[in-house]
Image: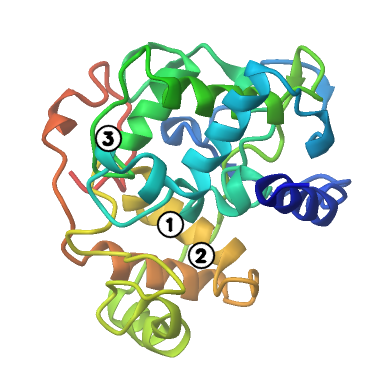
Amino acid sequence: MNRPVAAWAVLVCTLGGVISCVPPPRVTESEEETSRPSTESTAYALFAPPSPESIPGDLRGEQIRLGYEMVVNTQVYGKRYIGNALNCTNCHLDGGLNPNAASFVGISTLYPRYRERAGRQMTLADRINECFERSMNGTPLPPDSVKLTGIVAYIEWLSKTLPAGSTVPWRGIPRLTSTHQPDAVNGKKVFEKKCVFCHGSDGQGTRAAPPVWGPHSYNIGAGMARVSVAAGFIKANMPRGWGWTVTDDEALDTAAYINTQPRPDFPDKIHDWPKGGKPADVPY
């Protein structure tokens, strides 16, 4: 078994049984739809990623493997399309297999779909390119790019166990329901206590974790630049391996501190939410 497949096997075995009960509310990957009830289906899917052994040994299998590498080693395989120091797996943890971190499992079944931020119907490839422009502070991959095709193939493979019409209850990031007013001053204290070991005292990252602000982090057009989204991610996943150990208030405060620090602009933000509906915590 080669290294990527072996890694998938470990992740699938670890996560395959994680969700067998009703998950917490989500901040969806389509950030503007956080309060919209799902009308997609009455079926309720279980989190069950496919086995790595199910990857075909043909061209499609090569596309899936390339897509995996683009996700976990974006700095190497997608370098020309990114403008910061992140890999896709920094947000889509464990190569998109973590159900508490915008998992890719089942996501392809939701596309094409209308997205309010763009004001139009979008394909899965369109959504991937949104991430490259915003979270990766880069440029979109060409429509005929084998690397874009590979990421789509990987996500489609991860979604293949879901029957048509299923909901994806783990979609996005768990949503916090706290009414606490985020306090960036306290957030700095929490960051210094629980985050600097991995992200550095200056937030510029270390060998253990990526930068969370500054020129090498996500830009203000990224979903993670919203305090509500970042707080949900922090609560469920941070410190890495110790998710759910910070309080809701600590998560909100830390997200506020991180997202009040400087980061790259996103010039195309002027085109967002052309028909209205922009969430209150969008930083522009």
The three-letter code of the residue at mark 1 reads: Ala
**Which amino acid type corresponds to the residue marked 3 in the rendered image?**
Glu
Distance from the alpha carbon under mark 1 to that under mark 2: 6 Å
Q: Is residue 108 above or below residue 18?
A: above
Q: Quadrant of the C terminus?
A: top left
| Contact check, label 1 and label 2, Cβ < 8 Å | yes
Helix, strand or loop under label 2: helix
Q: Quadrant of residue 170?
A: top right
What is the distance, in whole Å, between disc 1 and disc 3 at their CAs? 18 Å
Image location of residue 36, percent across then percent down? 55, 28
> SS class of the residue under badge 1?
helix
Dot 1: within a 10 Å radius of its alpha carbon, few (fewer than 14), some, or many (20 or more) residues? many
Is residue 72 positioned above or below 235 on the image?
A: above
Label 3 sits on a secondary structure element that is helix
Tell me which residue sits at (44%, 51%) in the image.
Answer: 229
Q: How is the image coloured?
A: rainbow
Q: CA distance from mark 2 to mark 3?
A: 22 Å
**Can residue 37 be spotted in the picture?**
no
Mark 2 or mark 3, which has the lower sequence index? 3
**On screen, residue 51 above or below 260:** above
The answer to which of marks 1 and 3 sits earlier in the sequence is 3
Residue receiving disc 2: 234
Q: Which mark is residue 230?
A: 1
Q: Nearer the viewer, residue 227 or 107?
A: 107
| Residue 165 position within the rendered picture, expressed as x and y whole percent measured from the top left | 75, 13
Question: Residue at 78% across / 55% down in the picture?
Answer: 10
Q: Is residue 161 visible?
A: yes
Residue at x 17%, y 23% (from the top left corner): 271
Mark 3, residue position: 133
